[in-house]
Structure formats: C-alpha cells, structure tokens
Amino acid sequence: MEPNNIVKDTEEGMKEAIAHLGKAFAKIRAGRANPAMVSGVMVDYYGSTTPLAQVANVSAPDAMTLNIQPWESSMIQPIEKAILESNLGFNPSNNGNSVIINVPPLTEERRLELVKQAKAEVENTKISIRNWRKEANHELKESDLSEDLQKMMVNDVQELTDKYVKMADEHFDVKEAEIMKV
C-alpha cells in the first residue's frame, strides 16, 4: 500500500473511533431524558430479539419523561419487560397505549458511576486509536520506503495519534462536566 494511503486510512480509523465515542456518550445519561438512553434495549418481538426503535417510536416529551409508543399494542408488555431487564435503572409504566418512563434525577453516587462508565469508553477509544497507530507503523516498517521517509511517516502517524487521543480526552471532559452538573 502507498505510504500516504496508510496515513489516510489510519486517520479515517481514528475518526471512526471518535465517532463511536460520541455515540457511546449519547447513551450515557446526563440529566435530561433522551431517546438514545434506551437505544440499546432489545425487545422480544414474536420470538426474535429486535431493537426497541424497530418496534416503537421513542420520544422525550419533557426533560424527565420518555414516551415509548409501540406500533402494535400487544408489544407493551414485552417492551416493559425488556426495559426492566436492561438494567438501566428505569421503572416503566403503561397507560394502555404507550410505555412511560419517568427518568429520576441522578444521585451523586449514580453520577460517579456514569463518569466511570464514560472514562471506560474513553479508554476503549484510546486503545482503538493506538491499535490504528500500531497497525500503520507495522505497515510502514514492512514497506520498501527509505529510512528517512519511513521515520517521517511514523512521526506523522504519531502526531495523528496524539491529536485523536487529545480529542478523546476533551470529549470526556465535556461529558464529565455534563454528568456532574446538578
């Protein structure tokens, strides 16, 4: 592979790692009700495990409530069961037409747990970024480039790594402040 393509592919991979971090952070609750909070919930839909978004419409009518409107009324019980089993700490109720989740305010203890969860996501992202660096450096070392050009490209990859690791840390700082804000 051409050296410039190695660096380009590495940067693309690092961008994807940061994008994945953003999606993971969207699922971590920070006070306000958000439909992404239940995006990982899987519902038993006629014998097959299906994402909640494929069997119902999820909305946040206000800052402390999630409203889940199933497309079939027979899905209310399975949705409630799936939410309870998902260990999100929610206690769903239903009004016969939809499932309602009152999102409780976060306790200090829960906020600290969420910060730990966010920190773990950042660490996974950093590992992914470093794996991209390792792979790129390996490909550069295996290439038939001159020693000087190889060193220059390895330095470019290291600069990318530093840039994206710093970006992950900045994302964490923002999310931590968001979670800890009462």
Image (cartoon, rainbow, N blue to C red):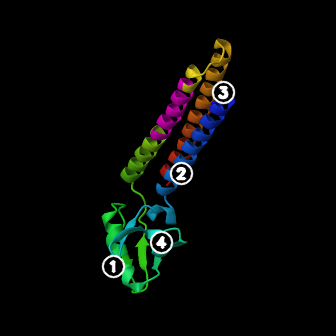
The three-letter code of the residue at mark 1 reads Gln
Task: Give the label, 2 or 4, closer to the camera.
Answer: 4
Per the picture, the main secondary structure of the magenta-coloured stretch is helix
Q: Residue at x 58, y 40 (%)?
A: 13
Relative placement, left or right, of 33 versus 145 is left
Q: Which residue is mark 3?
A: 3
The three-letter code of the residue at mark 3 reads Pro
Q: Is residue 99 visible?
A: yes
Task: Give the label, 3 or 2, closer to the camera.
Answer: 3
Q: Residues within 10 Å of mark 3 (few under 14, many from 20)?
A: some
Label 3 or label 1, whichever comes before in sequence order: 3
Q: Which residue is mark 2?
A: 178
Q: Secondary structure at mark 1?
A: helix
CA separation, marks 3 and 1?
A: 56 Å
Question: What percent of the width, then of the height, locates residue 110?
Answer: 38, 53
Label 2 or label 1, whichever comes before in sequence order: 1
Q: Residues within 10 Å of mark 4 (few under 14, many from 20)?
A: few
Q: Which mark is residue 77?
A: 1
Q: Residue furthest top?
A: 147
Question: What percent of the width, then of the height, locates residue 29?
Answer: 47, 57
Relative placement, left or right, of 135 versus 96 is right
Q: Residue at x 49, y 59 (%)?
A: 31
Question: What percent of the width, then of the height, locates residue 167?
Answer: 60, 38
Label 2 or label 4, whichever comes before in sequence order: 4
